Image (spheres, rainbow, N blue to C red):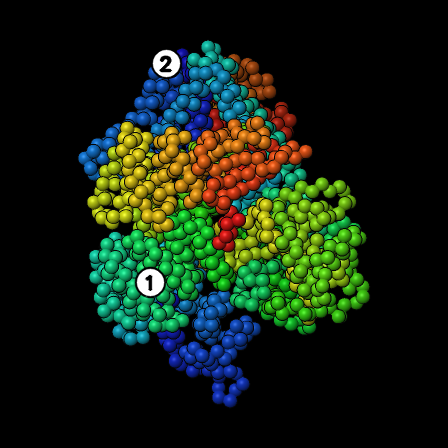
Amino acid sequence: MVRRPFKLACTIAVLALISLCPTASRAQDLPLEGSDEPIYDPLDPFDLIGSEEIISSDKDDEKSAEELLRDGVLLLQLDRPLDARTKLLKALKKDPDNYRTYNLLAGYYLIHVGHYRLALKYIKRAEELFEKDYGPPPYRERLIRKEHSNLLYYLAQARLNLDNYEGALEILDRYAQLGYHDDWYPGSRAWVLMKLGNIQEAIKVARLGVLAGPDGARTLNMLGILLSMNDQPQESLEVFRQAIAYELTLGSEGQPGTPLNNSGEVYKELFEDEKAESTFLRATSFRDGCEHILPSLNLTLLYVEQVKYEAAISIMDNFDKCIAQFPLRNNEEHMALENLARGRIDLHTGNVDRAIKRLEASLEGTQWFGKIGTNQDDMLVGATISLAQALRAQNNILRSTIAATWGEWVAAKETITSNSLRAWWLMRRARQMLVEDLKDIEDLTIRNTDSLLEYPTLGDVLSGFSSTGLSARLARQLAVDSRPRAQLFYKAYSAQANRSLFSRSGSGKMLDEVIEQARPRFEDLLQIQAMALRMESLKPLSDRYRDLAYRIFYIAPAELRNRGLKLPIQIERRGLPDSLPGLLEDGPFLDGGSSGSLCIVQAAAATEPNGATSISFSCPGNTSFNRTVRGVDPGELVNKLSDALFREEIRNGSNS
Amino acid sequence: MTRAVHQDQASPSRRLYWAVIAFRCTGAVLAIAIINALLPLGTSQSAVSVAAIVGIIGASWLARSRSTSLGFVVAALALSTAPGLAIGMLNWLAGLVGLGSLRAEAIGMHTTTCGIALAIAAAATWVFWRVRIAVTLEAIMSLLASIALFSAHREFHLDRPKILNSIAWRLGVDPLAMLVIVGSLLIVSVLAYLYLASLATRPQADAVPVRRAPGKRQIFLGACSAAILVLVVFGIQRLLYSHFSAIMLARTANGVGMGSKDGASPLSFQSALGSSNQPAALVRLEGDYSNNPFSPMMYMRETALSSFNGKEMVFAGRAFDTDIPVIRPNEAFTGKEDAELSQRTPLVQSVYLLADHDNAFAVDYPASIVQLKNPQPTRFKGSYRAYSVAPAYELSGLELDAVGDPRWTAEVRQHYLEQHPDKRYKETAEKITAGIQEPVKKARALADYLSASSIYTLTPRHEVKEGEDPVAPFLFGDHRGYCVHFAHAIVYMLRALGIPARVGTGYLTDLSQAKDGHILLRMSDRHAWGEVYVAGVGWVPFDVQPQQVESHAETQVDAKLLEELMGILLPGEEILPPRLTKDEKGIEEEGAAWIPDPRSLLPVLYAVAALLVITKLLLRFGWRLVPSPQRKLRLGYVAVASALYDAGISRTEGETRLEFAQRVTIANLRPLATAVVREAYGPTPSISAERVAAIMREVSSPLSSLPRWKRCLAALNPASVASLLRGGGW
């Protein structure tokens, strides 16, 4: 879930700081009446006279620390962060004992840069100097109290973003004990309490905050998140509705994308896919929903579950275009998550080599989770499982690829061996992380908002646990998760975990139920997973196998080859090279005889003088899968046909 | 005496036994660390290492017992699987009683990982002790591992594997040097291990020891041989280093090397495979650059190639390209600001070099470059601040502008229009720009054409003979190439159309990977591009960005490293001392394994050296300090014997002191040895101080008959101190 940024609160804090600059020194610094120097009022947001003068560093050496500090504040308001940083550092050099400069730099690193370690250093130094100037708290002077409360605010935010929740709570306690109060307080306290697992207390704090504070949207948003976590989805949606309405009233200052995304997540949890989709789409249409990855990511992952890969790609492309408008935004805010989403799309569309690269990049990349409810462990587990799946898919593809030379054959075997080892280890590691880092698979709740797991295929990793242990865990889960649609997923996991044991027939029955009950359009990936698992236990030439193979082929052809399943086809031998039928069976195809319902492979044209042959693939009643490939070597023909059928190149929302 | 002799005979083989075990344990720990870095184990590395060490020691102990192979397999299986089985059983029971938790499974996984490590280490060790060809097999395995390790560097991928690169970075060593060091150490370690392994008595594998266990002298000679071997290996590696480092730079830097020699080019057309993410510099923008026309990209120019030598573009000399400060990074520069240029904005950049650079670089046009204080000389190679007059134009707004500078002389204009003799460049350029009148639009059309038709690859593999045009196979051939090919192609075509152009070199960086205006430049960011002089605006990059990419080195900037470097720059420990965040949670720097600062090791080395000198001095002259004649005599003997020991003359096994004294010819040791033996075994101590002094006068300089260089070597040899640590026995 996205947390509303604390930019507004910080701006207010900055303005408060300016107002606290000693009046005498400000009066001193103002140009005298009649002088040529421009007069500007830093408190007037429309008064930008002299901003160019400020940006220029020509006269910086002559300016006092206080003047440079004021310049820095104004430049921050003008959205010139680097100029502001330089001015503030110059101010610091001139007067290294002014806590205001440290405080402003702390705010700068908290808000503009997201360098929390550095922000914390500045704020701690500011606090030290503040106490040197004014003595230890409590303070009686109103302005001093205000400034101290601002220091504590930054300190709490820095600790919060460094995942030091106990430390943040300690500051918030101190804040309350000193009798301070501000609009941000209930929301922050509720967030910290939530992170510490004290949901009930957090709800109480957030409710009080909503009643008391004028900064309603942020606290409302927080309350909505908490209610959703407390299994009160309807109440949560109602609260988000209020938050959205509130944000919309703020006009361009509002951030409705955040509560919209959060309510989309709740709809997703409720399996109201259409509402979730429209809510995420709406979120991405707002500036804050467009520039932050979560609404786009949520929508993309929803589309992946629905096997709408073109739409998924299109959402990610739109996000890239959107983020390109902010050239100074650092990639670490979104790149690892984007690689994860794109990697999964590549995997499911058969572009496995690219998927592996992207997923590896996702695992290696740094993701900034400052304002996001999910965390690094969620992403690591999600990416690790997907990478293991991609490695297994690559093995299946290599097994069905005809090697042209002995060298290729040896290289393929080497890759298969190392991939198998790596995939086994990654799945094992993922299971370990699921239990240890994600607290006994707390994300087993299907469509958990903070999770980055791919629920339809989660059975791939869960089936590695012992069947008794997993059964007991699933039983515990079923006791607390009463959502009917979630039951289908749990059933699929049970079936997958048990299918290699004695209850193969029971497992088959469960998979059949999943196949039948999965909602078309919304749970296509789950259905494909169940069908693929079912096919593994069927005789390859049985009617049921053929039926399932074609159902998968028409929805997501890449899944067949990815999972090492063969497509039954009719081979029209006339005009084909002699070795081709055998090679087709070594590839991802199966000679299914001459049933009229099968797709047909046949010679497309007479063999050319240079030995080149063309073969065509056509399916009765479905021309969208018609393909023709040309090549000299029969193995090359099979490989080209496999790639043409089982690899989808999706770019800019269109299949090519 | 008997016991002492017995111990002397037994200890070398025991020492060898433990030396081999120690070597194997070290190897296992290192292997586990490498595996953990490549594929996280998920279980504590220490726990897995301990399991492997237990496996090695246990298997060594069993191998020297009467245990059979079957007995060993049973023992190893039991030891490695028992904990896992026990936990599995508990887990099964937990499942049966419906606890619904999988935590026991995770514990089971940890124990299994340790069990696997134990079993593998034990099996390999058992085989080593019991199978005759095990040492040969291990030698082959070491060879294969070395090949696997070094094959990662093929095609100049010197930044692999990541773990080595990371250590090199921490130590401030360049990657090639790191490879040389690791390669040498590896060879020496493996040879030392194989040598020791061949000496060790293996009870079942060898009915008789392969070789007799060595004496002290042999160990000394062995150590000397190893030292010579190390020197030879390092010598060879040094030769390799100097051979490869020259071509390394261009290969690891997208083909864009360094240097500014007139009439020469730093660019390479052959291959840029090896393009690496090695950090090159940290650039800090000191102000916002919101009107950057190339946003989010930013060009930082280092040099320009405007002269055509008949084959490629080369440096033109100081008569041309006067806008570029061709200075070394440690020099200052003050340029003349061109008042005619418009649509530009001041931009200040602080540059902190992380790799050696021949020339300073900056966003064009640098009005001045001044030196900055290097915030950390061990990390940064140099630092300077550049004040640039940076581009602030709208690219679309230049389309109707004229090209070339009206102030140029005919000679200068001709220089920038010097054409390639191959007419095909002109024909191609005219074909692409047919119907376009404005020169800037023509330049844009050429760049667009090349972007659409070119395939980016780091290995174009064009067959170009000496003196042939390296660009023709790209432009009139397969269209495969990298920035060097693209830049040359566009410049040749631009000039063919009468548009003044040159090749710019330097860095092209993506500001979206910057943080707080801090940009981490990598070698893979080095770039070459075409430039056109637009009247009133100056040199404007017209870069080719191919849409088709065959191979690309593009990766994310290491954000952790960037933050770490930012921490060095900002604003310094005097303002933000580390104590501020001493007790704060979550701020510890995550990074590579801890590597000690080489400087912190120096005091330790000094202390060891000082201790060594003091001990040697005490050994030599300690006898003078004691009052008792008996002690004086004993220590006097030690002084003489240790001096001889350092010169390589020592008692052999079973040799008495008197026999030794008889054997030594370079000094008259007999009176001293006789007196010592008499005092040791005589009825009562009776020697006087005067007598001791007289004896010592006779033999006080036992090495005086040796040449001076041998005496110097003996003075430096720490063998006597090492012998003292082992209990003396002179």
As rendered, which of A549 and B642 lies closer to the eye? A549
Inspect the image, locate mark 1, and give the three-letter code of the amino acid beneath it: Pro
Q: Element under label 1? A: helix
Q: Residues within 10 Å of mark 2 (few under 14, many from 20)?
A: few
Residue A81 % position (x, y):
47, 67
Q: Residues within 10 Å of mark 1 (few under 14, many from 20)?
A: many
**Residue extending furthest front?**
A596
Image-based side of B414 in relation to A483, left or right: right
Residue B719 % position (x, y):
51, 27
User: Which of the chains bears the disc numbered 2?
Assistant: B
How far apart are the alpha carbons under marks 2 and 1? 70 Å
B31 above or below B305? above
Instruction: Report which quarter residue A474 is drawn in.
Output: top left
- Give the residue number, with chain letter if any, for mark 1: A259
- Give the residue number, with chain letter if any, for mark 2: B68
B539 above or below A48? above
